[in-house]
Image (tube, helix red, strand yellow):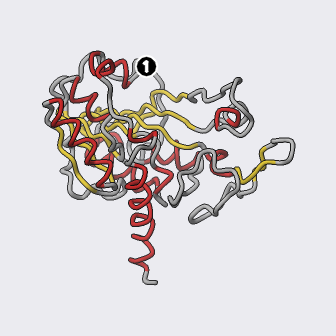
Amino acid sequence: MSTDDSRSGYRRQNQTAWNRLSDGSQFAKTASDEECRDPLNALDGRGWLPPTVAGMNVLCLASGGGWQSILYAAAGARVTVLDLSPGMLELDRREADRRGYSVTTVEGSMDDLSMLHDESFDIVHQPVSTCYVPSIVKVYQEIARVLRDGGLYISQHKQPTCAQITQRTERNQFIVGIEYFHEGPLPKVEDTSYREAGAIEYLHRWDELVGGLCRAGFVLEDLREPRRADYKAPVDHFGYRGRFIPPYVRLKARRLPRQQSTGSTRLWLP
């Protein structure tokens, strides 16, 4: 296999996996009427978004499925949604047409935004998805390019330890069976609580998740760990695992003015 084939292989396989998930999975849940009546609250329970996004250019990155893009459109934003999966993007188009919203859909990979112009967005909002590309640094660099100075980047990622779990013992204790400095696609594992069937995933370390963000020209303004513990869930449920291993991290970052961002690795907090 050539280098080019190897680099694009993860995209082909993940596209196939997410096309399958676009048909009735939990990830294909479109925005409800109730959510559309108060879209910013549905999108942002932490107060990270500005009081209004009306008239802003928003990129919903790797977030096809008819939820995020529809809510931003309901809030008056000019929305572009980019996703690798045509099946997921079809849900965005269908819901936008049904509700009378204007949403631009683009098929592409989050680590190559070459079809998008420099400094063309005020907000980039990305759900958990960077685990599906080998280099999170490339994703950050592309987002830094398309965001305007002072633009907001809201994202959620899988924590490294979440990717390291391979199986459980007979006492339902979790085994960290993948090395922290693992390179390349993650191997198949017995415990698939936070894995999507058929997808290729990668482990990104904290140095890349947070340090790489700063080095790409962003200031980190907030960091949260969503609570995914369910004390009523059975032991084979992902909510049980969430009691012991936090699966995700949410980041709020701001694009530095370009003349300030060269070589900057400072981390500022409000």
Residue 40 percent location from the top left of the image? 32, 20
Nearest the viewer among 36 and 156 is 36
- Vertical side of 144 occupied by 7: above or below: below
Q: Is residue 234 left or right of residue 66?
A: right
- Considering the numbered disc 1 on the image, is that residue within a helix, a strand or a loop? loop
* Residue found at the very far front of the displayed protein: 24
Q: Is residue 203 left or right of residue 168?
A: left
Q: Residue at x 38, y 48 (%)?
A: 23
Q: Residue at x 29, y 37 (%)?
A: 257
Q: Which residue is mark 1?
A: 45
Residue 243 percent location from the top left of the image? 71, 30
Residue 270 percent location from the top left of the image? 45, 21
Q: Residue at x 50, y 33 (%)?
A: 250
Q: Residues within 10 Å of mark 1 (few under 14, many from 20)?
A: few
Nearest the viewer among 160 and 66 is 66
Nearest the viewer among 210 and 22 is 22
Q: Is residue 3 left or right of residue 145?
A: right
